[in-house]
Amino acid sequence: MRFFKSFKRPQHAHLFWVAILTALALVVFNQVMIQYMLQQKNSDARVLNMVGRQRMLSQKINTQVFQAASDRSVLPELRSSMQEWRQGQRYLVYGSEPLKLPACKNPKILLQLLYADQHIRISAAAVDSLLNGRTLNLEQFSVNQTAFLQKMETVATDLEAEAAHSLRLLTMTEIFLALFSLFVLVSEFLFIYKPVLDQLYRQKKIVETENALNLATKNKLEAILNSTSDANVLIGKNFEILSINKTGIKLLRRFFNRTPQENQNILDYIMPTEVEAFRLNFADALEGKTTKIRKRMHFPHESCWFEIAYYPVYNQQAQIIGVSFNAKDINIAQKRFEKLQEISWTHSHEIRRPVSNILGLMQLIEWDKLDDDNKKLFQYFDSVTKDLDRVIHKVVGVSSEKDRVLD
């Protein structure tokens, strides 16, 4: 552990990928070595099989030669066996791609194979003499074949020793690679994976804390939205309902007799006569414009006055992600407004007309023909009428201001 503590842990997260690639490279290299070991083992096995085959052919030819001494019908089979024997020896020396036999590269084994090939040549010459009808010294032929078998026995022993040595070497190499891979993996875990995982764990804690705060904020916002008497719907760019408060659900259920759900199309809850205006105001809001209107909405079973607003909604990167649709029921305010309009009309027409007539008549009075008492009386009457006219003007002015505000 002191050895590991003496190193400084890397702080760069990209080393995480370096560690993964290193581990992958080790796995690939180990697999390559295993495949090479298996191929080498199979190659050694094929060479040993060929050596064993050559020894069997030597014994077979020896038997056929003794048979041919008394039976000439064996000669064609002897000739075929002899060709196969010589060809097999060439494969052992020079290799064969079809048989997947490698050429002999061990000088000691190659020398033994060349010595054995000389015995094959002697046997081939003897068989040729036999095929040409000459007498064959069977004892010398048998001695030559025995010498060949001894040479091939030595070759087989050397090949087995070489194969065992190669197998031990490859096994040790594989064990070393396995230990080295284990060391690399442990080092990567201590100096790369663990620091990265610790950092991810800390980030996870931060994210969980932020999520808890966001959830609390969301709950507060939902509580605020659900406590208001205004219907509020957050709409995505494709007219999908992202969120809706309880008042909005209640109003849409009241007018359309069905409950809206998130991800539904808001156009399903817009009267056909209002769809075009809704689309235009929605498009303006997506361009960053705020629109407020006051209008009477006609539904299948009733009509109602609403104050409607379209607000653009932004994310933390100041990008518009949707539109906030706000509808406020102003039926009571509209009735008061209409009543105020009625009062204003009454004051401006029914009451002000006689007052204006009185003021006009006052202009026709010949003040110089009146005595002092009448002058005082008419002056008082003129003052009171003007006061009344000012009150009427004030009431009409207040009504006009209220009309402008509501509009």
Image: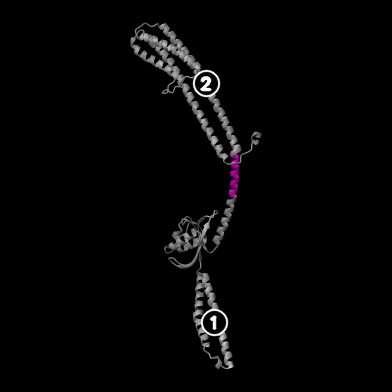
SS label for mark 1: helix
Q: Is residue 340 visible?
A: yes
Q: Which of marks 2 and 1 is nearer the N terminus?
A: 2
Label 2 or label 1, whichever lies nearer to me, is 1
> What residue is pinned by disc 1?
389
* Whether residue 400 is situated above or below residue 31 in the rendered picture: below
Q: Which residue is drawn at 60% across and 45% down?
A: 202
Q: What residue type is labelled 1?
A: Asp
What residue range appears in magenta? 193-208
- The quarter holding residue 78 reads top left
Is 200 a magenta residue? yes
Q: Can residue 157 be seen in this view?
A: no
* Residue nearest the viewer, comparing 36 with 280: 280
Name the spot of residue 108 as percent of width and height, x first.
50, 16
* Residue nearest the viewer, comparing 302 with 390: 390
Is 147 a magenta residue? no
> What residue is pinned by disc 2?
164
Q: Residue furthest left?
A: 73
Dominant secondary-structure state across the stretch colored magenta: helix
Q: Residue at x 37, y 10 (%)?
A: 128
Q: Could you tell whether 171 is left or right of 98 in the image? A: right
Name the spot of residue 60 as percent of width and height, x first.
40, 13
Q: What residue type is labelled 2?
A: Ala
Q: In which quarter of the image is the N terminus?
A: top right
SS label for mark 2: helix
Name the spot of residue 209 as percent of width and height, x first.
60, 50
- Badge 2: residue crowd in 10 Å (few <14, some 14–19, many ≥20): some
* Whether residue 307 is situated above or below residue 21 in the rendered picture: below
Marks 2 and 1, Cα distance to the nearest angstrom?
128 Å
* Whether residue 301 is situated above or below residue 390 in the rendered picture: above
- The quarter holding residue 148 reads top left
